[in-house]
Every structure is written in structure tokens, then in C-alpha cells.
Amino acid sequence: MNIARFILLLSLLAVRSLPAEPIHLVRPEATVHAGTADDLACVIDGVTTGPRGWSPAPKVAEPQALVVRCERPAEADELDIELFFLAGRPLNAIADFALSYTTDGEPSLAGNWQPLEILRFNAEVTTLRRAGPGRLVSDPLPRAMTGTIPDDVYRIEVLLPGRRATGFRLDVFPVIARDRSVPALSWYDPYDFSLTEFSIAEHARETTNIALQKPVKASHPLYDLMTPTALTDGLPATIAHPDEAYTGSDFWFEIDLGKSVRFDHLGLRTRGDNYLDRFSRI
């Protein structure tokens, strides 16, 4: 069947991650770099620990950017991006940043860049929060004497529109730290950072969910800010349901699988709250 019409809250089957295939990167270029060309090259050498890498000091009061090129064009639905700040400089990770991609034949700082769609993210030390398309901001850390002040690692899973990229870009934006009145690129003194590794890999997963990331339409408006794509985004925490409570059999979701397929089972998942009638009419 090419078009599947389901009345449901979430269609999701369990997935199991496989080892990621790395994207080989070459020729990093930065708007400002405090060290040597060899130092900058360390940001894609496969060695996650420092102290060498990309550092834009002393230009910490204005936006900066780093561009990396793919040795061969990256072709994948999803990518895993890791940013390592393992230079022995605790509390000096990037505070506000955005990730984008290009399909230009020769990626450059002046090229055509589009934001990557961020699916999931986490950090080993701080907390990351969404701040716009392809953009994340970190929380300042409390100044607590615990005996351990580790360096940080950011891990972001993104969707690659068009399934192809020739280069990737990291933009860094200044923030206003609590103890100073001028902007800076990290939350704490010396308000700089050292990115010791920029790693990108194809996100590989084994799944029976043929609807994963497929486009979805709804026959009627959804509640509040909900979107139909919550049904196929692979995230168990997202839901979608009609804005009107009594649309009845007139309401439907439509998932475009993009091709004719055969399937032998269908998984439906609802929200585990006290409203048991949510899933009573399908």
C-alpha cells in the first residue's frame, strides 16, 4: 500500500542502534583561530582529547564559525555529531551554537548553508536546550565545589535534509555571562573555548518501522502546537491528537510511505495517562 491511513496517537516500533559509520572530514576553516594551522587540523584528526583544537581567543565578543569539508559527500538520513571540549579547561565549552550543512561543490564560510534538523541531544556536564532551527544553548553550571569539574562533550543527532552534504558548519554566538556585562562565547572566565574534536558519523539503526521519518498529514487541526510528524519522528515522548474532541470517524492521519510495501504488523502507542478513552476508537 502506498498511502496508509491510521487513526492513532503515535506509531512507533522499538529500534536498536548499530555502530555508526564515520564521515571523513578534511580542511577545516575558521573565521578566527588563535593557534597554528596544525592546531586547527587537530579538530578533525580523530583524537578527542586536547589540548590542541579550535580556539577563537581573543575574539570572544563576536560570533565565530568553523567549516569542515567532507572527503566524499555524506549521504545519510540521520547523522551523529559530537563536539568534544577535552582540553583540560572545565567550564569553557561553547555556550550557544548552531549546526548547518551545505551541498556546495566547494564548501566555504561564504557558501550556501542550511540549518540541520536537530532530533535529539545531550551533554555530559551541562544541560542543552533548543534555541531555534539547528541551534542549541547550554545552561550555566552552578559554582559548587564537588571535587570534580569535568570537561564536556556535546552529542547531537540530526536529520540531513535531502540525504546529502558536502560540508558542515558550526556557528558560535556570544552570550552575556552572569559576572560580566559584555558578551562572550562561554559562560566562565576566560570566556573562550577549545574544541578538541568535531566528529560526524552516519546514524545507523536497525528497525522494522517503515514509517520512520515519513511525511504525515491530518484531516483536521491538531491540539495547540502539536504537529502530525510526531507520529513518525521516532520519539516516544511526542504525541498528536485532534484539537476538537468530537471529530469522530471524520478524523484521520495519513502517512505517505513513499512506495508500495507489504507489512505484517502495526504498532500503535498512546500516552500512559488516566484518560483511557484516548485509544478507545480506532
Image (cartoon, rainbow, N blue to C red):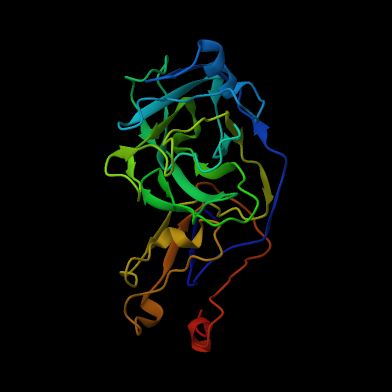
Instruction: Quadrant for the N terminus, please.
Output: bottom right
Q: Residue at x 65, y 50 (%)?
A: 148
In the picture, measured across the screen, residue 179 lies left or right of residue 20, that is left
Residue 159 coordinates in the image, percent (x, y): 49, 42
Image x and y of residue 129, in percent: 44, 54
Quarter of the image for residue 25 reads top right
Q: Please tell me which residue lies in front, 256 or 55.
A: 55
Of 282 and 123, the residue lying toward us:
123
Which residue is nearer to you in this view: 117 or 280? 117
* Residue name at image x 32 percent, y 71 percent: 224
Residue at image position (35%, 26%) is 59
Q: Residue furthest top?
A: 37
> Where residue 236 appears, x then y in whole percent?
56, 64
For residue 275, side relative to residue 113 (left or right): right
> Which quadrant would residue 182 be assigned to in this image?
top left
Q: In the rendering, at what x and y percent does residue 189 appear?
A: 43, 39
